[in-house]
Amino acid sequence: MPSQRKASLQEFRSGLRAPLPLVIGVFSFGLAYGILAIQAGLSFLESTLMSLTVFAGAAQFVATGMLMSGAGALPILVTTFMINSRHFLMSASLAPYAHGWKLRWKALLSFLLADETYAMTMSRFSKNAPSKYYQLGVGLNVYAVWLLSSIAGATLGPFVGNPQAWGLDFALPATFIALILPMLQTRRDVLVCITAGLLSIVCFAWLPGKWYVTFASLVAIAFGWGLVELCKWRSSR
Amino acid sequence: MALLGNARISKGMTEAMRFVPIAVLTSLIVPSLLAPKGHVDLSLTNEYLVAGIVATIVTYRTKALILTIVVGIATILAMRLFIS
């Protein structure tokens, strides 16, 4: 029905327009990622592929930072999984609106899901009828901006001779701080965090290379695990 | 996914998994904030330390990632401009 197609197109256009206020933010984030990736030793192709296929800013930043620090594959996988675990929740809350959508739509829209996309879509769907075209528009917009900005960053990367001079190297710790804080939900989490922090600075001074990361992390994790077991042991007495 | 589906992983390990990103991310950034130039610098002239504190506050209040990054970098630039 022609009127139905027109409505879908309108929804798509609305979706495309919606994230405009967020574009600057997404762009600078992507730019920073591109520059960081190049500085970390990733090739232009590798960094772009990451943005193309992963499309998860925080995870990409963290993975790159961890690679720079020589972290192994397993900790990177676990951390990335945990950081992106919020996607489970976002998808779950979007699911009721996706009732009846074909699988390939769900797959595409799930891939394109990002924090900004989620925010815009949920806000729209609370007032208007859910539309996969709207979500597609939003998703494509954010994805395109992300991709273009990280390509721009990767292009600039070799020329930004000294990102430290501009304080750009703080983008990484800042991202980590923004990610860690919400993770600290229980007192145990905070204790593990403090332990890791204290140990890492002590080990930084005493251990060669990047061993301080692994050592401090393992001890802090063991400490947290120990606290969990202790609590269980106590409550079973 | 394949790992978590394996019921042989003890429950304790799964619970400990939540500590992995907390521990790893923290130990990755703390030295770069407290010892940016290689030696521990806990004074307030350490612009990374100050920016770290500011970033923590911004995250706590706004939960906005990009704002945290922008304010943090701005703090560093501002400090370098005015303290030297």
Image (cartoon, rainbow, N blue to C red):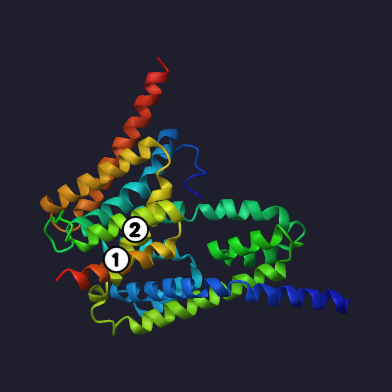
Point out residue A123 in the picture as x, y percentages from the top left corner: 65, 60
Observer able to see residue B23: yes
Report the residue at 41% width, 37% height from top: A186
Kind of residue at disc 2: Ala
Report the residue at 28% width, 69% height from top: A169
Query: Does residue A37 sit above or below A128 in this rendering?
Result: below
State the residue in front, A205 or B55. B55
Q: Are marks 1 and 2 in contact (CB under 8 Å)?
A: yes
Circle 2 sits on which residue? B55
Farthest front residue in view: B82
Q: Is residue B34 left or right of residue A147?
A: left
Secondary structure beneath dot 1 equals helix
Q: Indicate which disc, 1 or 2, sits on the residue closer to the N terminus.
A: 2
Which of the image's four quarters has the N terminus of chain A?
Answer: bottom right
Point out residue A208 in the picture as x, y percentages from the top left corner: 13, 56
Secondary structure beneath dot 2 equals helix
Q: Is residue A110 left or right of residue B45?
A: right
Observer able to see residue A72: no
Circle 1 sits on which residue? B75
Q: Hey, which quadrant is residue A111 in on the image?
A: bottom right
Q: Hey, which quadrant is residue A99 in on the image?
A: bottom right
Farthest top residue in view: A237
Do the residues marked 1 and 2 share a common chain? yes
Point out residue B31 in the picture as x, y percentages from the top left corner: 21, 55
Q: How many marks?
A: 2
Tell me the chain of label 1: B
